[in-house]
Image (spheres, rainbow, N blue to C red):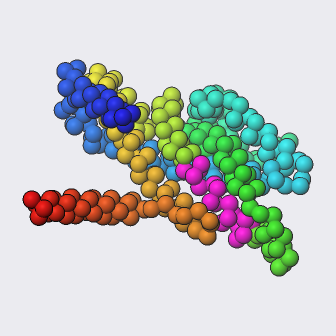
C-alpha cells in the first residue's frame, strides 16, 4: 500500500512538472548536449578523479600515521583530521581560491635562509582548477582517513603477526596482506564519498572553476532560464552518479569473495532472474487456464 501511494505521488509530481507551462522543454533539449555543458561535465569528471586520487593517497598516509607507535605522527594525523573536518568545505575552497592575496609568490628554497631555487607568481601556479583540487582533495582526505583506519582495524591482527613471522616487512605486509582484506570494509563508504565529491564540485562556482554547475549558471545568466538549466545539471549529475555506482558495485563483489556472506547478484543476473520469474508465472497461468478449460 505504501509503495503504491509513493509511486502515485511521484507520478503525479512528474506529470505536473512535464505539463508545467513555465518550463520550456525545448530549452532543456537544446542545452542538454551543448558544447559548454559537455565541457563542464568533462571538467567535473576530471576534477573528481584527480581530487579523489589525492584524497585516497593522503587518507592512507594519515591512517597509517594514526595507527603508528610514534606519538608525533599520531598527533600530526589527528591534528590534520581535526582541522579539515572542523572547518567548512566552502571556507577551504575560498581560502585556496584567494591564496594569492596571502602569498604573492611561492618560493622553493631552504627554510630560514636566503637560498632560493625557484620562485613563481602564486596565481600562475594555484589556478582555479588547482585550488579546487587542493580544497576538495585535502578536505576529503580527513574523512577518508577515518574510513581507511576503520578498514585497517577490521583486519585480524593474527594475519599481521603471521606475515611478520614469515619475514615480511611492515610496508610489504600493509600492501599485500592488510590492505586487500581491509578493502572489503573500505570500498562501500569510499564509493559514497566519491559520489559526494562529485556533487561537491558544484561549490567551486565560487572561484570560477568551469565545472558543470558553473557552466549552467553562466548560461542561465544569459538566457534567464534558470530552472531549465538546473534540470540539465540535475540530469547530468544523476547520470554521472549512476555511472560511478557501477564500479563500486563490482568492486564490492570483488573484495567480498571469501567471506561468509553470499555475493549480491549482478544487474545482469538480477535481470535474468526477473525474466525467469515472469516466465514461470506466465507458464503457471497458462497451465491453470488449460486445466480450467479441460474441466469445463
Residue shown at the point (66%, 66%) measured from the top left: 180
Q: Quadrant of the N terminus?
A: top left
Horizontal arrangement in the rendering, residue 27 relative to residue 137 (left or right): left
Horizontal arrangement in the rendering, residue 37 relative to residue 256 (left or right): left
Q: Nearer the viewer, residue 285 or 155?
A: 285
In the orientation shown, which residue stands out farthest toward the front? 295
Is 257 placed above or below 165 here?
above
Horizontal arrangement in the rendering, residue 240 relative to residue 193 (left or right): left
Q: Nearer the viewer, residue 82 or 136?
A: 82
Examine the structure image and report whether residue 187 is included in the region drawn in magenta.
yes
Residue shown at the point (74%, 61%) measured from the top left: 155
Is 249 placed above or below 104 here?
below
From this viewpoint, is residue 284 visible?
Answer: yes
Q: Quadrant of the C terminus?
A: bottom left
Examine the structure image and report whether residue 2 is included in the region drawn in magenta.
no
Residue shown at the point (59%, 55%) measured from the top left: 187
Q: Nearer the viewer, residue 204 or 163?
A: 163
In which image quadrant can residue 152 be found?
A: bottom right
Residue shown at the point (75%, 40%) measured from the top left: 80
Q: How many marks?
A: 0
Residue 177 position, x and y percent, is 72, 69
- Please state the extent of the stretch shown in magenta in the rendering: 174-191
Residue 167 position, x and y percent, is 84, 78
Prevailing secondary structure of the magenta residues: helix
In which image quadrant can residue 290 be found?
A: bottom left
Amino acid at each position: 500500500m505504501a509503495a503504491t501511494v509513493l509511486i502515485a505521488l511521484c507520478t503525479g509530481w512528474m506529470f505536473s512538472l512535464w505539463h508545467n507551462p513555465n518550463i520550456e522543454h525545448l530549452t532543456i533539449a537544446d542545452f542538454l548536449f551543448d558544447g559548454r555543458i559537455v565541457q563542464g561535465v568533462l571538467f567535473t569528471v576530471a576534477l573528481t578523479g584527480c581530487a579523489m586520487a589525492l584524497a585516497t593517497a593522503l587518507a592512507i598516509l594519515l591512517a597509517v600515521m594514526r595507527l603508528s607507535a610514534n606519538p608525533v605522527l599520531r598527533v600530526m594525523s589527528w591534528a590534520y583530521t581535526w582541522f579539515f573536518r572542523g572547518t567548512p568545505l566552502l571556507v577551504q575552497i575560498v581560502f585556496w581560491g584567494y591564496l594569492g592575496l596571502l602569498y604573492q609568490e611561492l618560493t622553493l628554497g631552504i627554510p630560514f635562509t636566503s637560498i632560493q631555487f625557484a620562485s613563481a607568481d602564486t596565481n600562475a601556479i594555484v589556478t582555479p582548477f588547482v585550488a579546487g583540487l587542493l580544497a576538495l582533495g585535502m578536505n576529503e582526505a580527513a574523512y577518508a582517513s577515518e574510513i581507511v583506519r576503520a578498514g585497517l582495524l577490521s583486519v585480524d591482527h593474527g594475519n599481521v603477526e603471521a606475515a611478520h613471522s614469515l619475514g615480511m616487512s611492515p610496508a610489504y605486509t600493509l600492501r599485500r596482506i592488510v590492505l586487500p582484506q581491509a578493502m572489503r570494509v573500505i570500498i562501500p563508504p569510499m564509493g559514497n564519498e566519491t559520489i559526494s565529491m562529485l556533487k561537491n564540485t558544484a561549490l567551486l562556482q565560487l572561484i570560477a572553476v568551469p565545472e558543470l554547475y558553473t557552466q549552467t549558471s553562466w548560461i542561465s545568466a544569459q538566457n534567464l532560464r534558470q530552472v531549465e538549466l538546473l534540470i540539465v545539471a540535475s540530469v547530468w549529475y544523476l547520470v554521472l552518479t549512476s555511472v560511478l555506482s557501477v564500479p563500486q558495485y563490482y568492486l564490492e563483489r570483488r573484495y567480498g569473495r571469501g567471506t561468509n556472506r553470499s555475493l549480491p547478484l549482478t544487474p545482469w543476473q538480477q535481470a535474468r532472474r526477473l525474466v525467469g520469474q515472469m516466465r514461470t508465472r506466465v507458464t503457471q497461468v497458462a497451465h491453470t487456464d488449460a486445466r480450467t478449460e479441460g474441466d469445463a
